[in-house]
Amino acid sequence: MKASNAHWKARLVGSIPELLGREIDIYETEIELRKKGKVEERVFAETRLRRGVYGQRYDNGHRYDGHKVQDLVYPSGAQTKGPNTLWDAPGMQRIKIPYGGLNASQLEVLAELAEEYSDGIAHVTTRQDFQLHFVHIDDTPTLMRRLASVGITTREACGNSVRNVTACPYSGVCPDETFDVTPYAKALSRFLIGHPDCQDFGRKFKPAFSGCHQHACGLVNLNDLGAVAVTRAEEGSIRRGFALYVGGGLGTVPYQAKLFDSFLPVEELLPTSQAIARVFARLGEKKNRNRARIKFLVDDLGIEKFRELVLHERKVLPHDPRWVDYVRAAEASREQPSRPGKVLSDDPTFSRDFQQWLKTNSRPQRQEGYVVATVTLPLGDITSYQLRAVADIARRFTPESIRSTVEQNLVLRWVSQIDLPELYSALEAVGLNQPGAGTIVDIVACPGTDTCKLGISSSRGLAAELRMRLTEKSIQLDEALQDLHIKISGCFNSCGQHHIADLGFYGVSRKVSGYTVPHFQVVLGGEWENNAGTYGLPIMAIPSKNVPELVARLGERYIADRNKGERFQSFIKRIGKAAVKKLIEDLARVPGYQENSSYFSDWGDPREYTIDDIGKGECAGEVVSSVEFDLTAAEREVFEAQLLLEDGKADDAGRRAYLAMVHAAKGLIRAEYLDISDDEEAIATEFRVRFYDTQKFHDPFVGGKFAQYFFAAHESAGRGYSRESAHRLVEEAQLFIEACHSCYNRVGTAIQSVVKV
């Protein structure tokens, strides 16, 4: 039986950073307030999304593992039927893993949580995050506390916020890198998480780092903010910097990132990123979600105008010592090997399986005698048992240096070459010795119709089928085919990154003789290398059941007709899309239902296919202004003040009620003046000048009466509260917050139109 939230809260006291613990307490209170109808659903939706709690599809009742349909034994008392809401059925918890960095203890906690609250499976995403599916919302505060106890947060894993900061998993050990970008990814993640300038975006914002231009490990070109390590000589020394890119993104229509600065010194990374965030928050689209990403803002303004606005914003930014402190702190941390690096000599007794794994799943580090070993995770899934095993293996063979990758795998760094046979045996014992990392069998796929509300076709089902077929003949595959990349999305939103694959697919549907048939649009011409250098284009839709034959035909044509050394992307460009379409157009035909009914169901799902259960996605939630967030937080604090009063803590209750008024006032002020400090005197002064003296706050019936409550509470703050005075202040605080809501409803548009430029 699972322990209660209260049990874990008490047990983990002292092991969670105070600020993070307070945030989780707030979230838990917000859940209770939502249940009581005291928080509007759309506001709470964005609140939970910013903590990584996500609604999911709940109609399939199975997970496809590539061999057969596995019926799920739902945890948490989940219902398999009934309303598809977070209150009636579990959802998904996304877990933020900056730059993919993990240690053994963190893997073990992930294993425990997957086992106790999910279906025993953790999923690695294309942004180096972890996801647990079928998690009940009532369990999420405990998940967050247990993660926080080992240094992991879910803060802003979803929502209109700065998402996980990704980075090349080989940073620090790659022979081709300019320098190790890990410290800078770590510093940026720490700086931007929860930053006030990153709380009012119209959509999500994704940063990424790469140590070089030529490889794809960081995928800088498809991110909102991308940084590639560069250096230049200055006065006889080498100075570090970044080629900084902005405005990339996939989605329905992909945009290549634009070069913002060819050399941004490392000390300017954090302030410039902050300035970019402020410009995006101020000028980015808020109403039309389809144009709310920064890529549209950069495109509309042009990179020159956008750069001008950001540089002006950077110039007027108040100095923040964290710009330097965070970077220096991160730079001071260095990975050190736990075992001596020794070269592995060839041995004729090595098994064929080990030699194949060695070829595809190990790569030399720039440090002599060491390699990076990749743990291939088909479909990005790993069981609780396997997570614990990887934790043990990491302790045994490495300095607990583990990274997740954008290809949905795990890598173990600092493995001594001589230890590879033993490491392979340990992986083999738990079923994690699959070869083929980075090859055609290492297929990337989003969750698709398994759990995503937007899924149209089964991306995981197709990926598993292709992997199974290709693995069966992988030894016989031509070397040129081994290097191809296949990526699959369940819909057009590109979560599976189909635009940058040699062979990309995204789910669509077609009506055939009155039946709805699952299809995949075929995308060709994408380039994985050069940090996602080129995006492919769709060529035609093919029934899902014909996609394996399509892959076989294109592969055979490529091997037969390619020029020496010609890459697949160049081959497709040379022969032309017309020739490709002619080669595969017969595969677009769907046989009649009586002729072959299998076409009318999807991979891994024997039921007749339908799109009736496609729902509304929750990738970022509705746009909720920072004012609404602040007022919701103020209401939560008033509620907490009532609880303190009930416990006989009058002084604490009075102080909490007063702070609720301060936070509500600050919320309104921030709509006009972003740089308002946390100083209570400054907030009271700015509120008086901007709202009371101008009469913006005056209600038609009571004038500025409720503002007077705030001013009086400010004057008496710190004098102590009796039960009576605390009770009165709680009531006055609630009235003041209601008046703030009313003010924002009346003049909110006018307020936002005068935000400082």
Image (spheres, rainbow, N blue to C red):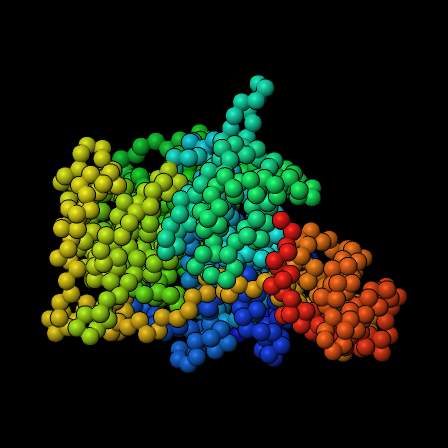
Is the residue 396 above or below the residue 40 in the image? above
Quadrant in the picture for residue 385? bottom left
Foreground: 713 or 137?
713
Is the residue 120 above or below the residue 320 in the image? below
**Relative to 368, 275 lies left or right:** right
Quadrant in the picture for residue 384? bottom left
Res. 227 visible in picture: no
Foreground: 22 or 507?
507
Foreground: 625 or 322?
625
Res. 491 visible in picture: yes
Q: How many marks?
A: 0
**Residue found at the far left of this picture:** 595
For image coordinates 57% across by 69% down, the residue present is: 43
**Residue found at the far top of this picture:** 236
**Residue found at the far bottom of this picture:** 82
For image coordinates 36% across by 40% down, the residue present is: 533
**Relative to 204, 684 lies left or right:** right
For image coordinates 22% across by 35% down, the residue present is: 566
Residue 396 place in picture, x, y as percent: 48, 45
Residue 361 place in picture, x, y as percent: 35, 42
Residue 143 place in picture, x, y as percent: 55, 64
For image coordinates 23% across by 41% down, the residue present is: 573
Is the residue 43 above or below the residue 684 in the image? below
Quadrant in the picture for residue 707? bottom right
Residue 127 place in picture, x, y as percent: 45, 51
Is the residue 627 above or below the residue 205 in the image? below
